[in-house]
Image: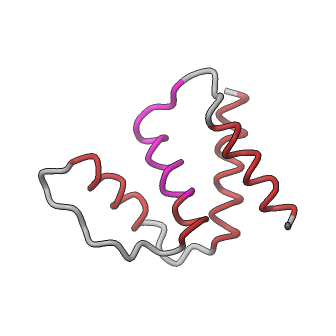
């Protein structure tokens, strides 16, 4: 397992033990970076207007299109470390 993947897995674990709950914008960023890092580009069908949460998640992930998995992992790690210092 690569060092980046190991650090990413640690950041995922650390994200579940943050002292404060991040705001919704930050939570969407965490979600989108995780999805991009683990699944790649968003190929899912766009949710309808009535499902606001699913649509916000879809939009956040779609904005990261063509971001490499490694880059998304590093951004995720950096964001979680920043929140832990916070």
Q: Position of residue 48 (x, y in %)?
A: 15, 60
Kindly give the residue lying farthest to the top in the view shown.
19
- Rendered-image quadrant of the N terminus: bottom right
Residue at position x 34%, y 60% from top? Answer: 58
Position of residue 29 in the picture relative to residue 56 (left or right): right
Residue at position x 76%, y 46% from top? Answer: 10
Q: Position of residue 67 (x, y in %)?
A: 57, 73
**Magenta stretch, main secondary structure class:** helix
Position of residue 42 in the picture relative to residue 48 (left or right): right
Q: Is residue 60 magenta?
A: no
Residue at position x 48%, y 57% from top? Answer: 32
Q: Which segment is the magenta one?
A: 21-34
Residue at position x 19%, y 50% from top? Answer: 51
The image's colour scheme reads secondary structure
Q: Is residue 84 above or below residue 13?
A: above
Q: Is residue 10 above or below residue 73?
A: above
């Amino acid at each position: 397992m690569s060092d980046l993947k190991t650090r990413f897995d640690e950041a995922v674990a650390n994200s579940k033990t943050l002292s404060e709950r991040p705001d919704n914008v930050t939570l969407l960023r965490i979600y989108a970076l995780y999805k991009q890092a683990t699944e790649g580009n968003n190929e899912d069908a766009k949710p309808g207007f009535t499902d606001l949460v699913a649509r916000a998640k879809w939009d956040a992930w779609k904005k990261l299109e063509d971001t490499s998995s490694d880059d998304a992992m590093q951004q995720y790690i950096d964001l979680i470390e920043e929140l832990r210092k916070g």
